[in-house]
Image (cartoon, rainbow, N blue to C red):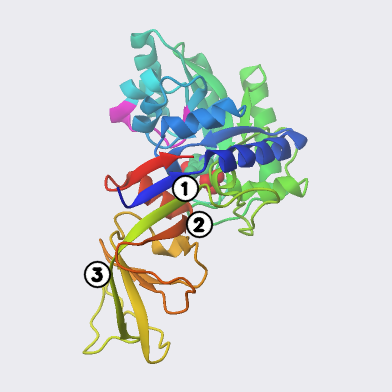
Amino acid sequence: MYPLLTVNTTHLRQNVHVLTSLCAEHGIKITAVTKVFCGDPVIARVLTEEGITMLGDARTENLKKLQGIDAEKWLIRPPMLSEVSDLVAYADASLNSEMETVRAINDEALRQGRTHKVILMADLGDIREGYIDHDELIAAAIETEGLPGVELYGIGVNLTCFSFIQYDTEKLTQLAQLRKRVEEAVGHPLGIVSGGNSAAVDLMMRGGIPEGVDNLRLGESVLFGKERAKYQYLPDTFSDVFTLECEIVELKEKPSLPWGTVGVDSYGKKPEFTDRGGHRIKAICALGKQDLDVETTVSCDPDIILLGASSDHLMLDITDSSRSYKVGDTVKLKLGYFSTMRAFTSAYVSKRYI
Ligand SMILES: *Cc1c(COP(=O)(O)O)cnc(C)c1O
């Protein structure tokens, strides 16, 4: 039963409304990103019920789970050559940066009698996926256009994920100009120009996304109400769509600091401890790094301190809490991005939807 993850679908619906109208004001269509919740179809259905028509995930396995849901499905990571047959079967579109892969998708699409939409990625500085050389991207677009099993759907960019390079009007203007060049080269308008992720929401709200960029792929902002340039919560959104209850298995008064010779942790780093003075009441909950990420988790009881976790033990300092906890009680945690991803990936976490 515990750890128990609760998905608040009412709060999620509200977040979808807020982001959808914000984006609509700026001529932006949303591809909602489902990778944080491992493509859980119950949650994906909530998104489509609230008007989302495009879903994106970084794993083909997750798109397979979304089969029964009426939306255009995108693989938002360059596909593996080894997964092309599942890709063509379960995804309608994918983000691409290797023509070898696009050719393989084309062959497979012809084999399966399906068609697949290709979005070519430009790298505008983050040094993750995409073409740095715009001429090379245009040549790829022309070749894609000539392949009978695929459709050149558009172009895109991703920033603020690896090098944490920020979105700005200059970079997205480069993308809009690239759109024009590609459209001239292939002789028809592109269906989509996908300008980025939740780190582009702040720029959008400041009116900084130029005409010609018409799509964002949004995970964090829709699910947590948080944009990722300044890491601010957006007005009228909820940050508690995902909460996790865990059970206390030990509760004892213990010293604030450990005793003995301190070694290094499994990353080779020497741990540091805060001296909160004297003895403190410490609780252990039955879950750990396998199920959550402490750094992107906060306690719903604001007086509980999250001390850290090992694989299967979460250590809490509950001394300052006004509630009197006992062994067998549960503690509620609010999960952020990576913590939610871990909780959904863990086979030990049960789920419920409210
Ligand atoms: C994960 C991902 C997104 C979504 O990012 P958020 O910051 O959660 O909105 C968008 N695009 C790509 C390519 C991604 O990998």
Which numbered disc flags the more N-terminal residue, 1 or 3?
Answer: 1
| Span highlighted in magenta in the image | 74-83
Q: Is 249 left or right of 228, judged from the image as shown?
A: left
Q: CA distance from mark 1 to mark 2?
A: 8 Å
Q: Are marks 1 and 2 in contact (CB under 8 Å)?
A: yes
Answer above or below: position of 96 versus 320. Answer: above
Q: CA distance from mark 1 to mark 3?
A: 28 Å
Answer above or below: position of 65 versus 286. Answer: above
Residue 72 in percent (x, y) is at 52, 22
Q: Secondary structure at mark 3?
A: loop
Given the image, on which type of amino acid does mark 3 rest? Ser
Given the image, on which type of amino acid does mark 1 rest? Arg
Does 76 lie within the magenta span? yes
**Which residue is at 57% across, 39% downward?**
10
Say which mark, if any, is on residue 128.
Answer: 1
Which numbered disc flags the more N-terminal residue, 3 or 2?
Answer: 2
Q: CA distance from mark 3 to mark 2?
A: 25 Å
- 241 vs 221, nearest the viewer: 241
**Visible in this render: residue 352?**
yes
Residue 320 in percent (x, y) is at 47, 78
**Which residue is at 43% across, 23% downward?**
91
**Which residue is at 78% across, 45% downward?**
207
Q: Are marks 3 and 2 in contact (CB under 8 Å)?
A: no
Q: Which residue is mark 3?
A: 266
Which numbered disc flags the more N-terminal residue, 1 or 2?
Answer: 1
